[in-house]
Amino acid sequence: MDQDVSAAGIDDPIAAGTDRLDPETAEKARSARESLAAHDGVLVAFSGGVDSSVVSALAHDALGEDAVACTARSETLPAAELDDAKRVAEEIGIRHDTVTFSELDDPNFVANDGDRCYHCRTMRLGRMYDRARELGIGTVCDGTNADDPGEGHRPGLRAVEELEVSSPLLDAGITKEEVRAVAEAYDLSVADKPSMACLSSRIPTGLEVTEARLSRVERAENRLREWGFEGFRVRDHDGLARVEIAPEELERALDPAFADAVHEHLTDIGFEYVTLDMAGYRTGSVSPGSDGDDGGGESDEAAEDGDARGAEGGSIDADGPDLDRRYPR
Protein backbone atom coordinates (compact mmCIF):
# COMPACT_ATOMS: atom_id res chain seq x y z
CA MET A 1 0.00 0.00 0.00
CA ASP A 2 0.99 3.66 -0.25
CA GLN A 3 3.74 4.60 2.15
CA ASP A 4 2.91 7.35 4.62
CA VAL A 5 5.27 9.98 3.27
CA SER A 6 3.91 12.66 5.60
CA ALA A 7 4.73 10.49 8.60
CA ALA A 8 8.39 10.70 7.60
CA GLY A 9 8.18 14.46 7.69
CA ILE A 10 7.91 14.80 3.93
CA ASP A 11 4.98 16.51 2.24
CA ASP A 12 3.13 14.35 -0.24
CA PRO A 13 3.56 16.26 -3.55
CA ILE A 14 0.29 14.90 -4.93
CA ALA A 15 -1.79 15.06 -1.75
CA ALA A 16 -5.22 16.67 -1.82
CA GLY A 17 -5.21 20.30 -0.82
CA THR A 18 -1.69 21.15 -2.01
CA ASP A 19 -1.12 23.96 -4.48
CA ARG A 20 1.44 22.05 -6.53
CA LEU A 21 -1.04 20.40 -8.88
CA ASP A 22 -4.53 21.10 -10.12
CA PRO A 23 -7.06 18.71 -8.54
CA GLU A 24 -7.69 16.67 -11.68
CA THR A 25 -4.01 16.00 -12.31
CA ALA A 26 -3.44 15.23 -8.63
CA GLU A 27 -6.29 12.72 -8.69
CA LYS A 28 -4.86 11.02 -11.77
CA ALA A 29 -1.42 10.83 -10.12
CA ARG A 30 -2.93 9.33 -6.97
CA SER A 31 -4.76 6.78 -9.11
CA ALA A 32 -1.52 5.77 -10.78
CA ARG A 33 0.23 5.49 -7.42
CA GLU A 34 -2.57 3.36 -6.02
CA SER A 35 -2.39 1.02 -9.00
CA LEU A 36 1.34 0.61 -8.40
CA ALA A 37 0.75 -0.01 -4.69
CA ALA A 38 -1.46 -2.98 -5.58
CA HIS A 39 1.62 -4.92 -6.72
CA ASP A 40 4.08 -6.73 -4.47
CA GLY A 41 6.88 -5.06 -6.41
CA VAL A 42 7.55 -3.39 -9.75
CA LEU A 43 10.48 -2.90 -12.05
CA VAL A 44 10.30 0.35 -14.04
CA ALA A 45 11.90 0.51 -17.49
CA PHE A 46 13.86 3.64 -16.70
CA SER A 47 15.53 5.95 -19.21
CA GLY A 48 15.93 8.92 -16.90
CA GLY A 49 13.48 10.91 -19.02
CA VAL A 50 10.50 12.65 -17.51
CA ASP A 51 7.92 9.91 -18.14
CA SER A 52 9.84 7.02 -16.59
CA SER A 53 11.07 9.30 -13.81
CA VAL A 54 7.51 10.15 -12.78
CA VAL A 55 6.55 6.46 -12.82
CA SER A 56 9.61 5.73 -10.69
CA ALA A 57 8.75 8.48 -8.21
CA LEU A 58 5.18 7.20 -7.88
CA ALA A 59 6.39 3.60 -7.56
CA HIS A 60 8.93 4.55 -4.90
CA ASP A 61 6.21 6.36 -2.94
CA ALA A 62 3.91 3.37 -3.26
CA LEU A 63 6.32 0.49 -2.69
CA GLY A 64 9.56 1.84 -1.24
CA GLU A 65 12.34 -0.77 -1.56
CA ASP A 66 10.06 -3.05 -3.58
CA ALA A 67 10.30 -0.65 -6.54
CA VAL A 68 13.33 -0.81 -8.85
CA ALA A 69 14.26 1.52 -11.72
CA CYS A 70 16.14 -0.39 -14.40
CA THR A 71 18.08 1.14 -17.30
CA ALA A 72 19.03 -0.87 -20.39
CA ARG A 73 22.61 -0.39 -21.53
CA SER A 74 23.32 -0.86 -25.22
CA GLU A 75 25.18 0.71 -28.15
CA THR A 76 22.28 3.07 -28.82
CA LEU A 77 22.39 4.66 -25.35
CA PRO A 78 24.87 7.53 -25.02
CA ALA A 79 27.13 7.22 -22.00
CA ALA A 80 25.98 10.64 -20.81
CA GLU A 81 22.39 9.41 -20.69
CA LEU A 82 23.30 6.45 -18.48
CA ASP A 83 25.08 8.81 -16.10
CA ASP A 84 22.02 11.06 -16.09
CA ALA A 85 19.71 8.11 -15.35
CA LYS A 86 21.84 7.14 -12.36
CA ARG A 87 21.72 10.71 -11.09
CA VAL A 88 17.93 11.00 -11.43
CA ALA A 89 17.35 7.64 -9.73
CA GLU A 90 19.43 8.88 -6.80
CA GLU A 91 17.40 12.10 -6.80
CA ILE A 92 14.18 10.08 -6.55
CA GLY A 93 15.63 7.73 -3.96
CA ILE A 94 14.69 4.60 -5.87
CA ARG A 95 16.97 1.60 -6.24
CA HIS A 96 18.70 1.72 -9.64
CA ASP A 97 19.71 -1.33 -11.64
CA THR A 98 20.99 -1.91 -15.16
CA VAL A 99 20.77 -4.65 -17.76
CA THR A 100 23.02 -4.98 -20.79
CA PHE A 101 22.12 -6.19 -24.26
CA SER A 102 22.93 -5.44 -27.89
CA GLU A 103 20.31 -4.49 -30.45
CA LEU A 104 22.97 -5.25 -33.06
CA ASP A 105 22.54 -8.97 -32.31
CA ASP A 106 19.16 -8.81 -34.05
CA PRO A 107 19.40 -8.63 -37.87
CA ASN A 108 15.89 -7.17 -37.97
CA PHE A 109 17.06 -4.20 -35.94
CA VAL A 110 20.25 -3.80 -37.94
CA ALA A 111 18.23 -3.74 -41.17
CA ASN A 112 16.59 -0.55 -39.87
CA ASP A 113 13.19 -0.96 -41.47
CA GLY A 114 9.99 0.82 -40.43
CA ASP A 115 9.64 -1.50 -37.41
CA ARG A 116 13.10 -0.87 -35.94
CA CYS A 117 11.59 0.43 -32.69
CA TYR A 118 9.44 -2.68 -32.36
CA HIS A 119 12.48 -4.96 -32.56
CA CYS A 120 14.45 -2.76 -30.19
CA ARG A 121 11.75 -2.47 -27.59
CA THR A 122 10.94 -6.17 -27.71
CA MET A 123 14.56 -6.96 -26.86
CA ARG A 124 14.82 -4.20 -24.26
CA LEU A 125 11.66 -5.13 -22.41
CA GLY A 126 12.51 -8.82 -22.67
CA ARG A 127 15.71 -8.10 -20.74
CA MET A 128 13.66 -6.12 -18.21
CA TYR A 129 11.45 -9.15 -17.62
CA ASP A 130 14.52 -11.36 -17.23
CA ARG A 131 15.89 -9.02 -14.57
CA ALA A 132 12.52 -8.74 -12.84
CA ARG A 133 12.33 -12.53 -12.55
CA GLU A 134 15.85 -12.61 -11.11
CA LEU A 135 14.69 -10.13 -8.45
CA GLY A 136 11.44 -11.97 -7.75
CA ILE A 137 9.35 -9.13 -9.21
CA GLY A 138 6.29 -9.96 -11.27
CA THR A 139 5.46 -6.59 -12.86
CA VAL A 140 7.36 -4.48 -15.40
CA CYS A 141 6.20 -0.88 -15.95
CA ASP A 142 7.02 1.70 -18.56
CA GLY A 143 6.43 5.42 -19.02
CA THR A 144 3.90 5.40 -21.87
CA ASN A 145 1.59 8.35 -21.27
CA ALA A 146 -1.94 9.12 -22.49
CA ASP A 147 -0.72 11.18 -25.46
CA ASP A 148 1.56 8.50 -26.90
CA PRO A 149 -0.99 6.22 -28.64
CA GLY A 150 -2.30 9.14 -30.71
CA GLU A 151 1.07 10.18 -32.13
CA GLY A 152 1.03 8.23 -35.39
CA HIS A 153 3.13 5.19 -36.26
CA ARG A 154 4.42 3.80 -32.96
CA PRO A 155 5.63 0.21 -33.46
CA GLY A 156 7.28 0.22 -30.03
CA LEU A 157 3.87 0.43 -28.40
CA ARG A 158 2.98 -2.86 -30.09
CA ALA A 159 5.83 -4.48 -28.16
CA VAL A 160 4.48 -3.01 -24.91
CA GLU A 161 1.07 -4.52 -25.60
CA GLU A 162 2.40 -7.91 -26.69
CA LEU A 163 4.59 -8.24 -23.60
CA GLU A 164 1.79 -7.02 -21.31
CA VAL A 165 3.90 -4.27 -19.80
CA SER A 166 2.04 -2.12 -17.27
CA SER A 167 1.68 1.57 -18.24
CA PRO A 168 0.37 3.38 -15.14
CA LEU A 169 0.46 6.86 -16.72
CA LEU A 170 -1.56 5.68 -19.71
CA ASP A 171 -4.03 3.77 -17.53
CA ALA A 172 -4.61 6.85 -15.37
CA GLY A 173 -5.07 9.10 -18.40
CA ILE A 174 -2.04 11.28 -17.59
CA THR A 175 -1.00 13.40 -20.57
CA LYS A 176 2.52 14.60 -21.34
CA GLU A 177 1.73 18.05 -19.99
CA GLU A 178 0.42 16.51 -16.79
CA VAL A 179 3.50 14.28 -16.53
CA ARG A 180 5.66 17.40 -16.48
CA ALA A 181 3.40 18.99 -13.86
CA VAL A 182 3.72 15.91 -11.63
CA ALA A 183 7.49 15.94 -12.14
CA GLU A 184 7.58 19.57 -11.00
CA ALA A 185 5.49 18.67 -7.96
CA TYR A 186 8.14 16.08 -7.09
CA ASP A 187 10.88 18.67 -7.75
CA LEU A 188 12.46 16.42 -10.35
CA SER A 189 15.28 18.03 -12.31
CA VAL A 190 14.02 16.38 -15.53
CA ALA A 191 10.60 18.08 -15.44
CA ASP A 192 11.47 20.11 -18.54
CA LYS A 193 13.73 17.57 -20.23
CA PRO A 194 12.78 17.10 -23.90
CA SER A 195 11.67 13.69 -25.13
CA MET A 196 14.69 12.17 -26.79
CA ALA A 197 15.40 9.38 -29.22
CA CYS A 198 18.12 6.74 -29.22
CA LEU A 199 21.21 7.12 -31.39
CA SER A 200 19.87 4.77 -34.08
CA SER A 201 17.23 7.41 -34.89
CA ARG A 202 20.00 9.48 -36.50
CA ILE A 203 20.38 6.83 -39.23
CA PRO A 204 17.83 6.97 -42.08
CA THR A 205 15.42 4.07 -42.48
CA GLY A 206 16.86 1.44 -44.79
CA LEU A 207 20.50 2.20 -43.95
CA GLU A 208 21.97 -0.47 -41.68
CA VAL A 209 22.58 0.40 -38.04
CA THR A 210 26.21 -0.36 -37.22
CA GLU A 211 28.40 0.22 -34.20
CA ALA A 212 30.66 2.51 -36.23
CA ARG A 213 27.75 4.75 -37.27
CA LEU A 214 26.36 4.90 -33.75
CA SER A 215 29.79 5.73 -32.33
CA ARG A 216 30.54 8.58 -34.71
CA VAL A 217 27.09 10.10 -34.18
CA GLU A 218 27.57 10.02 -30.42
CA ARG A 219 31.04 11.55 -30.65
CA ALA A 220 29.83 14.27 -33.01
CA GLU A 221 26.88 15.22 -30.79
CA ASN A 222 29.11 15.23 -27.72
CA ARG A 223 31.29 17.81 -29.42
CA LEU A 224 28.33 20.07 -30.25
CA ARG A 225 27.18 19.76 -26.65
CA GLU A 226 30.65 20.74 -25.41
CA TRP A 227 30.45 23.82 -27.61
CA GLY A 228 27.28 24.91 -25.84
CA PHE A 229 24.60 24.08 -28.39
CA GLU A 230 21.31 22.95 -26.85
CA GLY A 231 19.01 21.83 -29.66
CA PHE A 232 20.66 19.74 -32.37
CA ARG A 233 21.07 16.42 -34.15
CA VAL A 234 23.81 14.93 -36.27
CA ARG A 235 22.24 12.71 -38.94
CA ASP A 236 24.44 10.03 -40.51
CA HIS A 237 23.62 9.64 -44.22
CA ASP A 238 26.13 6.87 -44.94
CA GLY A 239 29.18 8.99 -44.16
CA LEU A 240 27.64 12.39 -44.82
CA ALA A 241 26.93 14.26 -41.58
CA ARG A 242 23.83 16.45 -41.76
CA VAL A 243 24.03 18.80 -38.78
CA GLU A 244 20.71 20.22 -37.61
CA ILE A 245 20.74 23.17 -35.20
CA ALA A 246 17.66 24.58 -33.44
CA PRO A 247 16.34 27.71 -35.20
CA GLU A 248 17.11 29.96 -32.23
CA GLU A 249 20.77 28.84 -32.37
CA LEU A 250 21.15 28.58 -36.13
CA GLU A 251 22.65 32.04 -36.51
CA ARG A 252 25.54 31.09 -34.26
CA ALA A 253 26.12 28.00 -36.40
CA LEU A 254 26.68 30.30 -39.40
CA ASP A 255 29.84 31.60 -37.73
CA PRO A 256 32.73 30.80 -40.13
CA ALA A 257 34.79 29.65 -37.15
CA PHE A 258 32.12 27.09 -36.31
CA ALA A 259 31.91 25.90 -39.91
CA ASP A 260 35.65 25.35 -39.98
CA ALA A 261 35.76 23.59 -36.60
CA VAL A 262 32.76 21.32 -37.12
CA HIS A 263 34.11 20.18 -40.49
CA GLU A 264 37.51 19.41 -39.01
CA HIS A 265 36.19 17.54 -35.96
CA LEU A 266 33.52 15.51 -37.73
CA THR A 267 35.83 14.39 -40.54
CA ASP A 268 38.39 13.42 -37.89
CA ILE A 269 35.86 11.03 -36.31
CA GLY A 270 34.93 9.33 -39.57
CA PHE A 271 32.49 11.42 -41.60
CA GLU A 272 33.45 12.00 -45.22
CA TYR A 273 31.33 15.12 -45.73
CA VAL A 274 29.77 17.60 -43.29
CA THR A 275 26.72 19.73 -44.11
CA LEU A 276 24.59 22.19 -42.17
CA ASP A 277 20.83 21.77 -42.68
CA MET A 278 19.49 25.27 -43.20
CA ALA A 279 15.99 24.21 -42.14
CA GLY A 280 17.32 23.71 -38.61
CA TYR A 281 16.62 20.97 -36.09
CA ARG A 282 13.20 19.31 -36.19
CA THR A 283 12.08 15.89 -35.03
CA GLY A 284 11.48 13.12 -37.52
CA SER A 285 13.51 14.67 -40.34
CA VAL A 286 15.71 11.63 -40.88
CA SER A 287 12.79 9.31 -41.63
CA PRO A 288 9.63 11.42 -42.07
CA GLY A 289 6.40 9.79 -40.96
CA SER A 290 8.12 7.35 -38.64
CA ASP A 291 7.92 6.68 -34.94
CA GLY A 292 8.08 9.40 -32.33
CA ASP A 293 10.90 11.88 -31.86
CA ASP A 294 13.33 11.39 -34.75
CA GLY A 295 11.63 8.18 -35.72
CA GLY A 296 12.71 6.35 -32.61
CA GLY A 297 11.32 8.15 -29.63
CA GLU A 298 8.66 5.97 -28.02
CA SER A 299 8.09 8.88 -25.67
CA ASP A 300 11.27 9.12 -23.62
CA GLU A 301 11.45 5.37 -23.10
CA ALA A 302 13.28 4.30 -26.23
CA ALA A 303 16.43 5.73 -25.06
CA GLU A 304 16.59 5.20 -23.69
CA ASP A 305 16.57 8.40 -25.94
CA GLY A 306 19.81 10.39 -26.71
CA ASP A 307 19.93 13.87 -25.20
CA ALA A 308 20.32 16.92 -27.45
CA ARG A 309 20.50 19.43 -24.62
CA GLY A 310 23.60 21.48 -24.05
CA ALA A 311 26.05 21.07 -21.23
CA GLU A 312 25.31 22.70 -17.91
CA GLY A 313 25.70 26.42 -18.27
CA GLY A 314 25.40 26.39 -22.08
CA SER A 315 23.63 29.45 -23.43
CA ILE A 316 22.35 30.94 -26.64
CA ASP A 317 23.87 34.19 -27.82
CA ALA A 318 20.79 36.34 -28.34
CA ASP A 319 22.88 39.03 -30.06
CA GLY A 320 23.82 36.80 -32.97
CA PRO A 321 26.98 34.92 -33.90
CA ASP A 322 30.16 35.56 -31.99
CA LEU A 323 32.73 35.78 -34.75
CA ASP A 324 35.53 35.79 -32.17
CA ARG A 325 34.38 32.56 -30.51
CA ARG A 326 37.00 29.85 -30.47
CA TYR A 327 36.18 26.19 -31.09
CA PRO A 328 39.06 24.14 -29.64
CA ARG A 329 40.99 21.93 -32.03
Image (tube, rainbow, N blue to C red):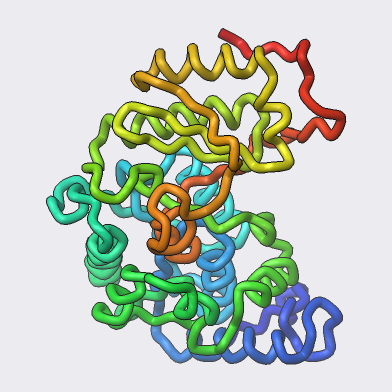
Which quadrant of the structure image shows residue 33? bottom right
Residue 32's place in the image compared with 49, above or below, is below
In the rendered view, does 26 fall on the left or right side of 287?
right
Residue 164's place in the image compared with 272, above or below, is below
In the rendered view, does 57 fall on the left or right side of 318?
left
Q: Position of residue 229 (x, y in %)?
A: 65, 33
Q: Position of residue 293 (x, y in %)?
A: 48, 58
User: Which residue occupies 31% across, 46% down?
Assistant: 74
Q: Using the rendered image of the protein, determine whether residue 272 is visible from the camera's viewpoint.
A: yes
Q: Using the rendered image of the protein, determine whether residue 131 is visible from the camera's viewpoint.
A: no
Number of marks:
0
Residue 117's place in the image compared with 264, above or below, is below
Q: Position of residue 223 (x, y in %)?
A: 54, 25
Which quadrant of the structure image shows residue 323? top right
In the rendered view, does 247 fall on the left or right side of 217?
right
The outermost residue toward the top is 329
Screen quadrant of the C terminus: top right
User: Which residue occupies 37% across, 22% down?
Assistant: 271
Front residue of 212/131: it is 212
Q: Position of residue 318 (x, y in %)?
A: 84, 34
Front residue of 250/118: it is 250
User: Which residue occupies 81% across, 28% down?
Assistant: 320
User: Which residue occupies 55% across, 38% down?
Assistant: 244
Residue 249's place in the image compared with 179, above or below, is above
